[in-house]
Image (spheres, rainbow, N blue to C red):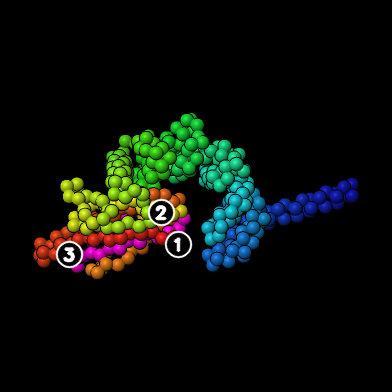
Amino acid sequence: MLKTVCLKRVFCVAAITILAVLYEAAIGLPLVSEYYFTSAQKFEKGFLWSNAEELYGKAVAYSPFDARYTAGLADFLLRRRTYGKDKADVYMRAEELYGRACRLDTYSAEYFLTLGQLQLHLFRLDKEIYKDKLAAGIENLQRALDNDPFGVNICYLAGYSSIFVWDYLDEKQKDVFLDKLKYALDHRPWYANYLYPHLWHAAKGPELLRRVTPENPKVRKKLLDFVLKKEAIEGIKAESRKRVEAASDAISPAQWYGKSADGTRAYADGNMYWAGTMGAMLKVPEGNASVIISAKGVPAEGVFPYMDVELDGERIGGVFVDSLEGKDYVFNINTAGAEMVLSIIYTNDRLSKKTGEDMNLYIGQARVRRR
């Protein structure tokens, strides 16, 4: 009897000890993980990549069932990649980590969204080697939408990601993503500024733009402005082909073509006496390059003319042309390389009633060079 009582006491003490250890671990390990995680973030800000990766890894090791740390390590790897080469093995490792995060938190729309984006990126890197990633990526984007069907950013980002593999989607998948984009634009009209150029490229025209545009006056206005701008670009392309046989890496003053904002007066030799838009074709190399525009401006009441610069309708910069004698203005770009329309938009034209000063903008040669 005494022996039995002693054994019971031993078992009770052991059980209490085990519970105490487990309790301490449950409280202590997350604190340790959080310490490593925040320390890793500090190292990362200082660009100490090796130290940061080690501590992110320790955070995951101490809390292997916390999806936040696993996803955090994956995000770090992707951020670090931007400072080096675009290597597939980084995406593969990040995909593995986000896959684990999704299994740990099956209700997270953000994790499934990022996993799907990674898989589609791998597919685009090499469509033969990573051909299985296409279906997996689309499935995970749809899973993200299922987890958060009314999240504006989730709807927009899932739909936006689908555009880059548009030709590989079936009609049902396209309808789902277009509906989500339409929903997102209804709530965030300014997203159209980023979305429309990619949709236009995917559809080779305005068809998809009309499909995703909701009955929202602000978005309708953006659609109209965008289509008119594209039509203007096509007009400049047609006029440029009349003036030169083929686009080159330089534009002479005589090649500029355009009209005043009211459409009644044409520019000649790059002389912009009125607010408006003019452009010309430019042969742009693939990758990093610089567009160099020679220009001079005549101010009115101390204010110089301002020029916005666009390449095929996408803004690449803007500047006050503050040189009376003329100088070069440089705009850095990164493109896939093509014959593109370089446009100059002049908006702040004025004639001073006090001094009689007439603001004018003069555009000379434009050229492109590799960086």
CA separation in Å, label 1 and label 2: 12 Å
The amino acid type of the residue labelled 2 equals: Val
Helix or strand or loop: what does disc 1 sit on? Answer: loop
For residue 43, above or below residue 193 = below
Q: Whole-Å distance between the Cαs marked 3 and 2?
A: 35 Å
Q: CA distance from mark 1 to mark 3?
A: 36 Å
Q: Nearer the viewer, residue 337 or 185?
A: 337
> To which residue does mark 3 refer?
300
Secondary element at image label 3:
loop
Which quadrant, please, contains the C terminus? bottom left
- The prevailing secondary structure element of the residues shown in magenta is strand
| Among numbered discs 3 and 2, the one appearing first in the sequence | 2
Looking at the image, tell me whether mark 1 or mark 3 is earlier in sequence order: 3
Mark in front: 1 vs 3: 1
Q: Which residue is mark 1?
A: 371
- Mark 2 Cα within 10 Å, few/some/many (few <14, many 20+)? many
Q: Where is mark 2, residue-wise?
A: 284
* Residue range highlighted in magenta: 287-311
